[in-house]
Amino acid sequence: MSALYPTLIPGLRSPSHTVSGLVYFGRMLDKVRLAAAGTLPEEWCARRGMDPGSFDWRCCRFLNLDYAALEAETLRGGKTDEELLEWAYTHGRRPSEDEIEIWNAFMMKRGWRDAGTQRLNDRLAEIGLPAGAVQTMFEFIDVDEGRLTL
């Protein structure tokens, strides 16, 4: 196993955690706040935001939202996560309930029999686990960050 496994980052939620019914959004806000506080691992900082293919990028594309604007609004402070999501809907787009259901299902299953499977297996190998130890990237993240044990 990797000497860095598990990656314990206090204050970083599971990607499955929902804000007003939307998965991943709260985790993205946590990463913004942790980066600003200097407690997000340095190697993570380059991959957050609009790095194509990242979950941050996917979430911003889904909401038709500029990551830098969300980051600035988050760091301004004074808003709950639910209020930040409402801000995001106002400055991007408000998906329908059906679109949110599809988004949540897509994100929660990413890595299971899709274009993300190889990346999932690569990440598992990085921490010394065999391919198939978990089925999705969300499960991998929770294992890697010590929230889920195998």
Image (tube, grey):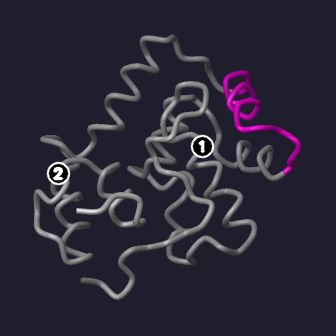
Q: Position of residue 123 (x, y in %)?
A: 26, 67
Residue 56 on the magenta segment: no
Which residue has dot 1 on it?
A: 26
Find the residue positioned furthest to the front.
Answer: 149
CB contact under 8 Å: marks 1 and 2:
no
Q: Residue 109, position in %: x, y?
A: 27, 38
Q: Closer to the N terminus: mark 1 or mark 2?
A: 1
x, y percent for residue 78: 88, 43
Q: Residue at 46% of width from left, 20% of height from top? A: 100
Viewport quadrant of the N terminus = bottom left
Left or right: residue 104 compared with residue 8: left
Q: Amino acid at mark 2?
A: Thr
Percent across and percent down for residue 32 are 67, 56
The residue labelled by disc 2 is 117
Q: Is residue 130 left or right of residue 58?
A: left
The one nearer the camera, 18 or 109, is 18
**Could you tell me which residue is drawn at 16 percent across and 57 percent down?**
118
The quadrant in which the C terminus is found is bottom left
Mark 1 or 2, closer to the camera: 1
Residue depicted at 76% across the width and 30% down the height: 83
Residues in magenta, as a range: 76-91
Query: CA–CA distance between discs 1 and 2?
Result: 24 Å
Q: Residue 39's quadrant in the figure?
A: bottom right
The crowd level at tag 1 (other Cα within 10 Å; few <14, some 14-19, many 20+) is many
Report the disc number at residue 2: none
